[in-house]
Amino acid sequence: MNYLKSLGLLRGGLIALGIFNVLIRPEPGSYIAYSGWEMVQTLVAPAAAPLFIMVILFDALMSKIRASDSSGEESKRFRIILWTELAAVAFMIVMWLPFYLAIGR
């Protein structure tokens, strides 16, 4: 619980939305749907994934800056946040890469 509290509500929500975006990703090579829930999976999620990645990376950069400007416990907190966000981005890239590579084929 303390770990989630140290992330903060907005940062935790951003990471949760990024992970949710990974969970609803379509299979590589799937057809595009133009209505219903399938539209969210085949059109919205692939367009939102790079945005989530860039925003999380920007927040990781801000965490790195805050960690370098602070000391002690606060510096440790921001380093943990930095590595959490980098892990989330790495997970998102690994999971979305097959889909984006299939688009080029």
Image (cartoon, grey):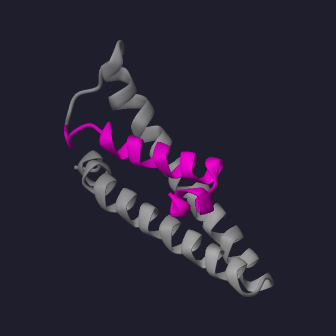
Q: Relative to 23, is 72 above or below?
A: below
Q: Position of residue 56 (x, y in %)?
A: 57, 58
Name the image quarter holding residue 79. Answer: bottom right
Q: Is residue 43 magenta?
A: no
Name the image quarter holding residue 42. Answer: top left
| 103 and 45: which is toward the camera | 45
Q: Does the magenta stretch include residue 26?
A: yes
Q: How many numbered discs?
A: 0
Q: Relative to 43, is 74 above or below?
A: below
The stretch of residues the image draws in magenta is 1-29
Q: Position of residue 76 (x, y in %)?
A: 63, 81
Residue occupying the far right of the picture: 69
Q: Where is residue 75 in the image (x, y as percent from the top left)?
A: 69, 81
Which secondary structure type mostly characterizes the magenta part of the structure?
Answer: helix
Residue at 71% of width from left, 87% of height from top? 72
Residue at 63% of width from left, 48% of height from top? 9
Name the image quarter holding residue 7. Answer: bottom right
Q: Relative to 32, is 74 above or below?
A: below
Q: Where is residue 84 in the image (x, y as percent from the top left)?
A: 49, 68
| 51 and 6: which is toward the camera | 6
Residue occupying the far top of the picture: 35
Question: Along the horizontal axis of the image, is 77 left or right of 20?
Answer: right
Residue occupying the far front of the picture: 1
Residue at 53% of width from left, 57% of height from top? 4
Q: Relative to 19, is 80 above or below?
A: below
